[in-house]
Amino acid sequence: MFMAGNEFEMNSSKVLVLAQSSGCSAYDCEFVSLAQTFNTQLITTDKKLIKAFPKQAVSARAYIEENC
């Protein structure tokens, strides 16, 4: 109930392409795809995601340094 109305459907084909090209899991690539859809950054501690998607995924530290 707390999250009601905040669900999003993912484009499975796009997620699988991201996963195949990056070597990251499809689960992780769902978050990358969502960030791309909303033209925003994905703040994560996952170093593999940051390396695979440097324009989309950033560490919390990098985000704070750039935006504060």
Image (cartoon, rainbow, N blue to C red):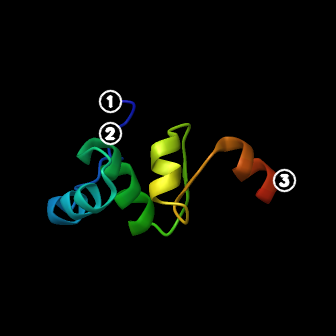
Residue in the picture at 77% in, 48% down: 64
Q: Residues within 10 Å of mark 2 (few under 14, many from 20)?
A: few
Q: Which residue is mark 2?
A: 4
Q: Secondary structure at mark 3?
A: loop
Closest to the observer, 8 or 43? 43
Find residue 19 and report its image quarter.
bottom left
Residue 20, placed above or below residue 47: below
Residue 12 image offset from top left, x and y in percent = 16, 59
Name the N-terminal-most of marks 2 and 3.
Answer: 2
Name the N-terminal-most of marks 1 and 3.
Answer: 1
The N terminus sits in image quarter: top left
Q: Is residue 8 left or right of residue 3?
A: left
Q: Which mark is residue 68?
A: 3
Q: Are the two marked residues, 1 and 3, in contact with CB atoms closer than 8 angstroms?
A: no
Q: Is residue 12 left or right of residue 39?
A: left
Q: Residues within 10 Å of mark 1 (few under 14, many from 20)?
A: few
Q: Residues within 10 Å of mark 3 (few under 14, many from 20)?
A: few
Residue type indicated by callout 2? Ala
Residue type indicated by callout 3? Cys
Q: Secondary structure at mark 2?
A: loop
Q: CA distance from mark 2 to mark 3?
A: 31 Å
Residue 38, placed above or below residue 24: below
Find residue 9 and report its image quarter.
bottom left
Residue in the picture at 24% in, 47% down: 26
